[in-house]
Image (cartoon, coloured by chain):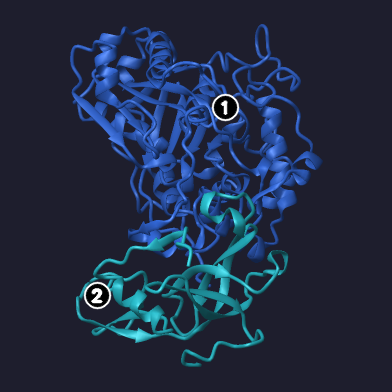
Chain colours: A blue, B cyan
Amino acid sequence: MRCQPTRAYASGLMPELPIKDKTAIAGIGWSTFSRNSGTTVMNLAARASLMAIDDAGLKPTDIDGIVTYFWRPDTPGPRELSAALALERCNYELFAQLGGGWACAAVMSAAMAVHAGVCKNVLVFRAMNGRSERRPTRASGGETGGAAQFTAPYGVMHAAASFGNYATAHMARFGTTTLDFAHLAVTQRKHASLNKKAMMREPMSIADHQNSRWVVYPFRLLDCCLDSDGAVALVVTSAERARDMRQAPVYIMSAMGGSEPFPDPWTTYGAIAAPQLYAGAGITPEDVDLAELYDPFTFMCMVHMEDFGLVPKGEVGSWARAGKNGLDGKVPVNTHGGLLSEAYIQGLNHVVEAVQQLRPSGVVDDLCDGPHTYDRTRCRQVRDPHIALCCAEGGQSSLLLRRA
Amino acid sequence: MTEYARPLPLPDLDTQPYWDGTQARELRAQRCSSCARLRWPPQGFCPHCYLWEFSWSQLSHTGTIQSYVVVHQAIAAFADAVPYTVARIIIDNTEEAVILTSSLIGVPWDEVKVGMRVEAVFDDVTPQVTLPRFRPSGSAAVDSDGPQY
């Protein structure tokens, strides 16, 4: 087996990015998350977008760029939303079929358009009726070309059947178990129970997880993310303009995109991206106060914790068992419940959560009535976080954000 | 004969010789004429030296399981097959350049292990298409059609 080369973080060989702290997320918004929205995807996109624009203290015609992404064709594109919002101009649009790996790259693209001076205020959204209008996975007869000609004939039809390989390799190499996965699922469900917009707020026990049916070994039902109807949106603008807007800015310190290679059978692209991501911000993983990490399956969140240097490689199983990813743990992870328990908005909901956590007033949709109490029966606000890490599927894009 | 209801490979100009090989009960991969390295999946040029000259080499029919999954939730055409195991198999003597995704048969799913030794068997799913599958090495009734390495 090939081994992952050792990489030094912030080695000095890679400079800070010129874009560091030059752009900010100034507004966030979301629709209701549900199993059946009863409305169109355009309406979901508009609800989240109008909330984000208003949150920033802007009006729709202040938006001059729109970015979204998808995997299955399930959403209106930027030009449709631009028309629906009656924007006066759109200097930049991007409609990327790159799936969950692109969640943080969507924000990165908006930041680059702003930093380049092409746009003032870019709207990033992700909207879908992913539950009520989800089409069945195609698996009938017929011919399959491209890379899938070597997998589809064997019944590889679902992300679990490709990402599951990283899990079984990790289990064999490091002794990680499905019981470790259970602890991660239970912790994230606890976080979701403190999130008014989360779809799954009922408590989950370790036994609930272990007794749930296999979907694709090594993943049980409660290792798998939800299917959701819903939308989230955010507004990216310059740091300078953000300081005059309604909310305290959340600065974009660093960002990375990409996709290949995955360096070994138990490691994602995140391990390739992480050194330059941290160097770009001039920080190290030690500086990260909370992380919102793509979690289509429990194990994927866990391997992202390792690959972005929050946990030593191979040790995430014991880390999860000890609850170090909890709200008062060493590095709180997926404080909203993630794709597993909040909703599947393909990872852009993770960025929205990071922004909430980093604002001076903190999250607005936990169970606290007044100021945050850190009483974990009501409050999901992390104590005094300065820097958040976000990553998308496989670490294929990532962000470092900091509070003002 | 009932029509085969599962996905079939659609070969292209680069991959056709591989699928021709499986019909002949061979596993084949390209070897660069310059640096002599094997590569997978098939493509027109060497990913190491970017030269276009190559030859097709016969591979060993044995390998080691690198990782695997077991599909339990039925999806359309594979509904009657669950649970079924799909593994990534490092083919012997390829310096890990050739890692095939394939069915693992002949072993209960909960006895599969990473590191298990396996050998190819050739399944003629249609008159035109042969899918290589793998089973634990040393299983009874070893397929003697192909070359033994």
Q: Inspect the image, locate mark 2, and give the three-letter code of the amino acid beneath it.
A: Cys
The quadrant of the image that shows the C terminus of chain A is: top left
Chain under numbered label 1: A
Q: CA distance from mark 2 to mark 1?
A: 48 Å
Which corner quadrant of the image does residue B49 belong to? bottom left
On the same chain, marks 2 and 1? The answer is: no
Which corner quadrant of the image does residue B11 belong to? bottom left
Which corner quadrant of the image does residue A144 belong to? bottom left
Chain under numbered label 2: B
Local SS, label 1 = loop
Q: Inspect the image, locate mark 1, and give the three-letter code of the amino acid beneath it.
A: Pro
Residue A382, given in percent of the width and then of the height, sits at 63, 25
Residue corresponding to mark 2: B49
Residue A129, given in percent of the width and then of the height, sits at 47, 26
Residue corresponding to mark 1: A385
- Residue A303 visible to the viewer: yes
Tell me: B56 left or right of A32: left
Local SS, label 2 = loop
Tell me: A234 left or right of B51: right
**CB under 8 Å between discs 2 and 1:** no
Residue drawn at x 37%, y 81% as measured from the top left = B21
Tell me: A99 left or right of A178: left
Crowdedness of circle 1 by 10 Å Cα count: few (<14), some, many (20+)?
some
Q: Decide which of B75, B117 is in the foreground and name it.
A: B75
Q: Can you tell which of label 2 and label 1 is closer to the viewer?
A: 2
Residue A367, given in percent of the width and then of the height, sits at 68, 14
- Residue A313 visible to the viewer: no
Q: Decide which of B6, A134 is in the foreground and name it.
A: B6
Residue drawn at x 64%, y 24% as measured from the top left = A383
Residue drawn at x 48%, y 24% as measured from the top left = A352
